[in-house]
Image: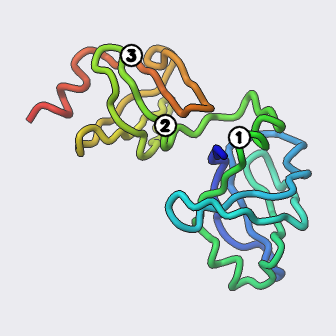
Amino acid sequence: MEFIQIGKITGTHGLNGNVSIFHHLGKLSGLKNLKHIFIELKRESYIPFFTEQVKIDNDQELFVKLEEVDTVEDAKSLSGKQVYLSTEQYEKLNPKEADINFIGFEVWDQQAGKLGKVEDLLETPGQLLASISVNGKEVIAPLNDQTIISVDIPTKQLKLQLPEGLLDVYLND
């Protein structure tokens, strides 16, 4: 099963173990009907949590009551954890306008070939940057209409055309 990160648990809400999830899916009424979500408790272990209630606060925040999370302490233990949907759930929601989270995507450059995986995303005003681990070194690459050639969500492949000389700046000692 493949997973797509949709956001993260940012804290607790109320006293009944509700969690607050900050997400990047935008306005999707289908979020109310989520039967379960996956939470990454340990690196690459996606544990399903069934939802009792999902309340949409705004375009970026959900308040979710999860089964078997009944106290503030239980909810706090999930704070900071990444939240995922299965690819199937994600496609059913059909979030066309949602931003894709590229973390974990395999990055290929048109000239240099396979580079590595996106470790982190950095948002600056007007620009999204990807931190890519290439042979143990960090490369910061812009993600925009000029650099992105193709994105394959099911296989998590990101093909880029990086500006000439960018890799040399990071990789040549």
Give the left or right position of residue 122, taking residue 38 as reference.
left
Q: Secondary structure at mark 1?
A: helix
Specify the amino acid type for callout 2. Answer: Phe
Q: Residue at x 36, y 21 (%)?
A: 109
Compared to 140, does 111 lie above or below?
A: above
Cα gap from disc 1 to disc 3, whole angstroms: 27 Å
Compared to 48, does 108 lie above or below?
A: above
Q: Crowdedness of circle 1 by 10 Å Cα count: few (<14), some, many (20+)?
A: some
Q: Crowdedness of circle 3 by 10 Å Cα count: few (<14), some, many (20+)?
A: some
Q: Crowdedness of circle 2 by 10 Å Cα count: few (<14), some, many (20+)?
A: many
Q: Secondary structure at mark 2?
A: loop
Q: Residue at x 49, y 22 (%)?
A: 144
Specify the amino acid type for callout 3. Answer: Gln
Q: Earlier in the sequence, mark 3 or mark 2?
A: 2
Q: Secondary structure at mark 3?
A: loop
Pinpoint residue 52: horizontal percent, then vertical percent.
90, 67
Q: Nearer the viewer, residue 54 or 13?
A: 54
Compared to 73, does 8 lie above or below?
A: above
Badge number at residue 161 = 3
Pinpoint residue 89: horizontal percent, then vertical percent.
79, 43
Q: Earlier in the sequence, mark 1 or mark 3?
A: 1
Read off the residue under disc 1: 87
Q: Quadrant of the C terminus?
A: top left
Q: Earlier in the sequence, mark 1 or mark 2?
A: 1
Q: Residue at x 41, y 46 (%)?
A: 119
Quadrant assignment, res 70: bottom right
Read off the residue under disc 2: 105
